[in-house]
Structures are given as structure tokens and as C-alpha cells.
Image (cartoon, grey):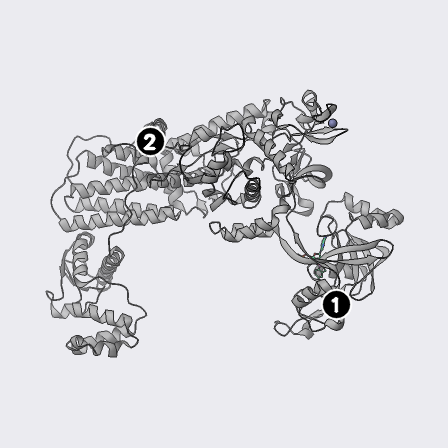
Amino acid sequence: MTTTGEERERGFDHGEVEPRWQAAWDDADVFRIDDDAEDPEYVLAMFPYTSGSLHMGHVRNYTITDAFARFERMRGEDVLHPMGWDSFGLPAENAAEERDTNPRDWTMQCIDSMKEQLTEMGFGYDWEREITTCEPEYYRWNQWLFKRFREEGLVERQAAELNWCPSCETVLADEQVEGEGDEELCWRCETPIEHREMDQWFFTITDYADELLSALDDLEGWPNNVREMQRNWIGKQEGASVAFEIPGYGDVDIFTTRLDTIYGATYFSLAPGHPVAREIAEDNEEVAEYVEMAEAADEDDLDVTSGVFTGEYAKNPATGEEIPVYVADYVLTDVGTGALYAVPAHDDRDHEFAEAHGVPIKQVVEPGPEAEVDADEIDVQAEAYTEDGVLVDSGEFDGLHSEEARDAFVEEFDGEHRTEYNLRDWGISRQRYWGTPIPMIRCEDCGHVPVPDEDLPVELPEFVHTTGNPLDAAEEWKQVDCPDCGGDAVRETDTMDTFVDSSWYFLRYTSPDLDEVPFDGDRASDWMPVDQYVGGIEHAVMHLLYARFFTKVVNDLDMLSDAREPFTNLTNQGMVLGEDGHKMSKSRGNGVSPQRIIEEYGADTARLFIMEAAQPEKELAWSAEEVQSAHSFLQNVYRLAEEFADGDIEMGPDGADIADYVSREIDATAARATEEYEQFRFNHALQALRELVSLLRRYEDATTPDAEVLERGVRVAAKLLAPVAPHVGEEMWERLDREGLLAEADWPSADAPEGYDVERRLVENTREDVRDIVDTVGIEDPTTITLAVAPEWKHRVVEIARDADNVVPAVMQNEDLQRHGEAAADFAKDLAGRAQYDETLSPEGELAALKRATWLIEREFDAEVVVRSAEDADDSLAKKAEPGRPAIDIEE
Ligand code: ANZ
Ligand code: ZN
């Protein structure tokens, strides 16, 4: 390579380049999507909570969607890639307390600085669609939707035992509680939680349990583990309910999944909250004490064996026997019917309880013939046998299989099929300030009255510093006239769970400024569902389940058609680990600040490193060394464009074969990278790009390259780089004097050259074989490498072998091949022993492919390379050649 032109500083200065292109994209409205766009590709990242700064987890998440959105845009798609702010929530209240400000000012400040960071990362969003959940323009629709849900019968007021964090002074959802038992801690401040009973507003998501469960099967674009987590959360149990009579108290329904064991029931158990338990408690001091104690205790404080005998007996409808009735804490009030019959022989908890209370254990199921254990190996006195099997000691039903018995017994004992779910209704009441006020008014006379639509939004009153809920302290705001009777009334002072905000924000992006309804139904119906949703696995259950619930409800409210699921494809990006191999976090001190990386290396380096280091779903370990490598690569690829543009690379008419080879590699790389981008395997796409760039470098080293081929190579490299490192891409594009912005340029055609894969295998295998020979023979300084391709007849042998059951006779029956006598027979025998015959090129194809690749082998071994057809080669050499495997001779 000769250097012409003046010597000057090479490379790019990210501090200058990056803001310039950010402004250029902005000026050209590259990321804007028209309202009348038809069904754009909807690419969405979970919007950030407004903590004030981006961490590497965010950067990773948003790099993924941005790269994909840019890729789709270059492929000619209309792309909707919006961004917004999940900006309600307790931390803002705490921050306001600490900093002597208010949650709103604090939040707005956070948004400003996070927005700046997103821009500095070069993420391309349609900022005209920005939404901010703490703005009345947004949260009024939470209120409006709450009212519509209520009209649909999907809002209920329920008393519930709640998790209470005494430090945050707030109710926590179960999923906001970490740990178990005595160790239940608040997820934010790690204070041990308490339990309190309170009246709450609930969305009856359980009405949708069945659909939320069954529709998971069709969500093929979701990771299996997320679907499984949702299935478990919903927790469907098919069982039955049957009535047991407790004389003096009437019929009590139980719920069971094991009706087949009814003959083995030896006691009966009521939850402390069951109405019959309370009734018994009225005349029974011991029971009264137990019920009181159990209700005060935390759910998990009492062990399985805690319980009290009531002195009453329940009549087993199967046996007619009377079995003792207990009140036991392990029976949960809000599960099933709050009552069960217990079968110690076949249930672990019942077994433990029976042992503690001296209740008999009676076996009614034994392993069937297909079971792995023998019936006489089972001792239910020692341990419960919990598998299905064959009934014993069950009257006329002995010998029935458990499954058959469950079916038969429903009718036999006047029961009902009953399905239970683990899923509970969604309590949305929060006793705190920084959230959406629940649009209800409490009137002494009229009860709970909704705020009329025309009075929405119910805006938050001014923030005041108090230890409790500031809304409670806002007297003036609280006191209102009842919308129904005009009398004195008070506002609901609870605000909504912030998961309400994120349950439909993806719909709002379709029409962010609309002020008649939450979203434009026609447009949302056209644009939804989201095609690619990317976010953290920590949202696998709650957020995604609630968003699915909302989507189904607005569908049933006729506000949205077609989409009953919000997200077609879901990717959960893996964790970002620090260099110490632990999750990157502030508290651990192993964090790397995005800001610092942007300043030191530029956004493109951070983006490239993140995308090269691991596939999106995998963990990503930070590595300063690899960051450096990403940076060098960017400089290298940029310099290639620069040198080319400045005429520093001498071009010439030499080496048509080489040009041909490079040209095919360019097409093949584009094809490969396209496929990898489509599959979210960005690291593979970038690997292909790196290989192309190093090929182009070798090309200009090896010969005077063809200007057209080289330019095309650099152009394709810029395009393949553009989704991930868009600033450097633009800078290259500009050097190459191309029109317009790279962000809006066409994606390179993705057709691999015909026969390319076969050709590549041939070339790679040949290079590998040469290396092997050089190594094993110990050739120090090869001078000439001769390659001879196999003769045509050998190709025919392979063809016949491919279709024949019996290779040797099939080959030898061929008259033409008979001419080659023993050689043909030997080759046929050889082939017969192989498992498969890879596809190969024709002899001419092999000759041409190897000729195109000679320069690579020449450069690698610093030797002359000669490629010959079978006819032109020495017989002794040509003899050894096979289709796909040229014969090789190396001279020292
Ligand atoms: C009788 C029986 C016999 C049961 C047997 C199980 C095994 P699983 O199966 O764990 O998913 N149950 C019913 N209501 C309950 C309540 N309110 N609180 C706690 N447990 C309750 O859950 C279903 C079983 O949980 C039911 O089937 C019932 O015990 C118990 F060999 O009934 B089974
Ligand atoms: Zn009233």
C-alpha cells in the first residue's frame, strides 16, 4: 500500500462527531413516524423508571431496541420506536423528603437528565410521542379507564390483609416483598414488613385467569421461561367441591384436587377466617382464642401443625363416618372454599398435622401396576403417598384408578367440578402521594361515588411533608360535594399502583396527545400489537401479566380490535455484570457509568461493546479490554473509509479473480448479517462485519484493488455497522460522499451469491488442509502449493452414491464409470462408508472458486499457489483429489 496525499491526523473524534449526527438526525426527523403510517414495525423497550440516571442495564436494553429499529428502518419499514417515563412511585417521594423539594420537581429534573443521556447514546426515538405518566394528561386516562373497568364490573372493594412496610409507610404488593416467613422484607428499604387488614380497590383480574393462561400457549414469540412463570403465577388447579355436613352448622363446601381420596378423610379443617369457624368460636372459648391469635399472626408465623379441635364432627358423604373438625391456620381463608377434608395418608401437610394431633391415618390409594414402586413398599403411617394410583379400602370403588375415581365421585357425592387459581385479584390501592388519585368520592349517604368524567383528571394536590400519606393531609383537596346528592363528602386518598400506568402506555404512544379518549382506537388497532418488546426479566410476571389483562379488557370494551395480546415477540435482556463477575450495582461499587464511557470512548464504542459481547438474552460481563477493542475496531473501520476517500489507497486493474472473490464475500456478508440481525443475534452480525473489514484490509494489502469493489465493500460495511454504531457509520457515509443520511439509506441486498456456502466450505477446508500438511510435515518455507480438483467422473460417483442404497454395485453398473475400473470401485467403496455426502460444486465451479481464493492462501503461506484441473495436473496428484477436497502438493 502506498500512501499518497498529505499526512494528517487519522481517525474520528467522538466528542465532535456524535453530537453532530444526533443533531442531523433530529433536523431530518429521521425517527418520526406519521400518524397515518400503515401498520409500522412497533419496536419497544420497557420505559424507564425516572431514577435520575441511566445505568448499564438501561443502556443495554435501549441499544438492543435502537439497533433493531434502525435495522428495520433501513430495510424500508416504517418504524415506531417511542420512549417515555414511568414517573410515579415512592422513590420520588423519598427523594423529595431527603432533598427538601417535591416529587414533581424532582421527577422532572430526573427526566431532563435521563433524556439528555438517551440522546447522547444516539438512541433514535420519536420524541413527539413522549409520554410521562405523572402528567395529568396521562394519568387522567388511568382514572377514566378505572371508571370504565368499574362499569364493566371489573373493580371491587375488598378487605384484604396487606403487607405493610412501616418504614415506607406503604402497602406492598406480594411481589414487592422479598424473602419469606420472618424474613419478609420491603423490596425498597429491606425493613421487615407487617400485616394489616384494610379495605382496598381491586381489579378483578381473576375474571380473566382462564384466558390469561390459555393464551400463553400461542405466544410463540415469548421465551418459554416467562410463559412458564406466568403459568405458575396463575396456577390453575382443576378439582371439585363437595359438601360435608357439620350437624348444627349445616353443609360446608370443601375444595379438593384429590376427590379420589375421600374415603381416606380422617379429619376436617376450617380456615380461621371461615364463617363456620367464627360461628363455632362464639360458643367455644378455645376456638375463639385460636382464631384471634391466628388472625393477628403473620401468615407464615404458624407452622403446619398449628390448629385446634372444635369438638364438632363432620359427616363424610362417602363413608357416612363422622370425622373431627379442626380450625387450622394452614387452611387459607381465600383459597378454594376455606375448608378441606384432610387425608393424612396422601398429603404431606395433613400427615404432619395428623401426627401432631393424634389423628388416624388411613390409606385409600396404592401404587398401580405401572408405578415404579411396589404397593408393599409403601407405608403411609411413616410418610404420605402423594401419587395417583389405584383405590383400596374405598367401598365398591376399590380398583378404580385415581383419575377415574375423581370423575366418578363428583356425581356420586353430589359435588361440582371446580377450577381454582393461585392468581388473586389485583389490589391497586396505595396509601401514598406520588401516583394517580383514584377517582372516587366517599359519601356518608351514597357510599362510593365515582368522580364524573367531566371532572377528570382529579389532579394531585400540592405535596406536603408528612409522615403519612400527604393526600390525607390535604384537607381542602379532600373535602368535596358528593356528585350524587351534593352533600359533604371526601375524596379517596389512595393512589393507584404504578403498574396501572405501565399496563397500557404502549397504547398511548399511538396517539399521545389525544384528549378525548386514552388512545385512538383505529390507529391502535392498526399498530398493535408491539412487534418486538425488550426489557428485564424482573417484569416477567407482574407487568407483563397486567399489560395482557388491560389489553384484553380494552378489547372487550370495544376500544381496540384485533389485538388481544399486547406483545408478539418478547426478549428479556440478560444482566450486566461488572468486571468482578457480579451484577453491576451501585451498592457493590462495581458499576461503570454510561456517562464516563461516553466521554472517554463515545456512545458508539459502548453500543458496539454491548452488542458484541453477548447475545441479548445472555449475561454480559463488562470488560475494559473488550471496550478498548470495540473502540479500535471503530477507528479501524472508519479509517478504511477515510483512506479510500482521500485516495490513499492505490487502485488498479490487477487481480480480476481477487476482485471477484471479494465481491462475493461482500454479498455473502450482507446476507449473513441480515439474517443475524433479524434473529436478534447482533453479535454474529457484527462478527460477520469484522470479518468483512479484515478481508477488505487484506485486499488492499494484497493487490491494487478494484475501486468499485472496494468502495462497495466499505459502503456495505458502513451500512452493516449503522444500526449498532450509527455515528461512526454516518461519518463513513459522509467520507464516501454518499447522498443523504445513512440512517435513511437502503439496507444492502441480502442475497448470498449462488453456491456461496458450498464454495466457502471448499475454500475453508482447503486452507485447513494446507495448514495441516504444513504443520504435520513440518514444512518451514513452502514455495509452491499446487491444488488439483477432482475429475468429472468422481463427481458422478458421488451423485450416484447419494441416491443409491447399495453404493458399489450402483456405481459399477454405470457403463461410463466402468471405464475407470478399479479406481472407480475403490472410490465407491470409500464413499459407501461415509455417513453423508456434502453438496459440492462442479469441477469447473471448484476450479473457479479456488482460483478466486488463491490470493488468500498465497498471503497466508507466502508461497505461489497454482490451481489445476484434473486433466492438467500430474496423474499421481489428481488421483488423490475428491469432489470438495482438492489434492494438495506443497514444494519447499
Ligand atoms: C383433599 C386432599 C387429599 C388434598 C390429598 C390433597 C391431597 P394442591 O393440590 O396443593 O395444588 N386445600 C383446599 N383448600 C385449601 C385452603 N383453603 N387452604 C389450604 N389448602 C387447601 O392444592 C389443592 C389441595 O389443597 C386440595 O386438595 C386441598 O387438599 C388443599 F391426598 O383435598 B386436597
Ligand atoms: Zn352522597
Whether 214 is drawn above or below 814: the answer is above
Ligand 1 image position (quadrant): bottom right
Q: Residue at image x 69%, y 35%?
A: 166
Residue 607 image position (x, y, % from top left) = 38, 38
Mark 1 residue crowding within 10 angstroms, few (<14) / some (14–19) / many (20+): some
552 horizontally vs 357: left or right: left
**Left or right placement of residue 654 versus residue 61 in this view:** left
- Compared across the picture, whether 546 is left or right of 345 comes to left
Q: Is residue 239 visible?
A: yes
| Residue type highlighted by circle 2 | His
Identify the element where label 2 is drawn: helix
- Considering only vertical position in the picture, is 135 above or below 174? above
Occupied quadrant, residue 786? bottom left
Q: Earlier in the sequence, mark 2 or mark 1?
A: 2
Residue at the image point whose x is 36% and y is 32% from the top:
30
Q: Is mark 2 within 8 Å of ligand 1?
A: no
Number of other residues with Cα within 10 Å of mark 2, as a class: few under 14, some 14 to 19, many 20 or more: some
Amino acid beneath label 1: Gln
In terms of secondary structure, where does tag 1 sit? loop
What residue did someone put label 1 on?
381
Whether 428 is drawn above or below 333: the answer is above
CB under 8 Å between discs 2 and 1: no
Does residue 459 appear in the picture of this structure? no
Which quarter of the image is occupied by the N terminus?
top left
- The spot of residue 160 in percent (x, y) is 71, 41
Check the picture and name the quadrant holding the C terminus: bottom left
Write down the residue under mark 2.
14
> Distance between the Cα atoms at labels 2 and 1?
75 Å
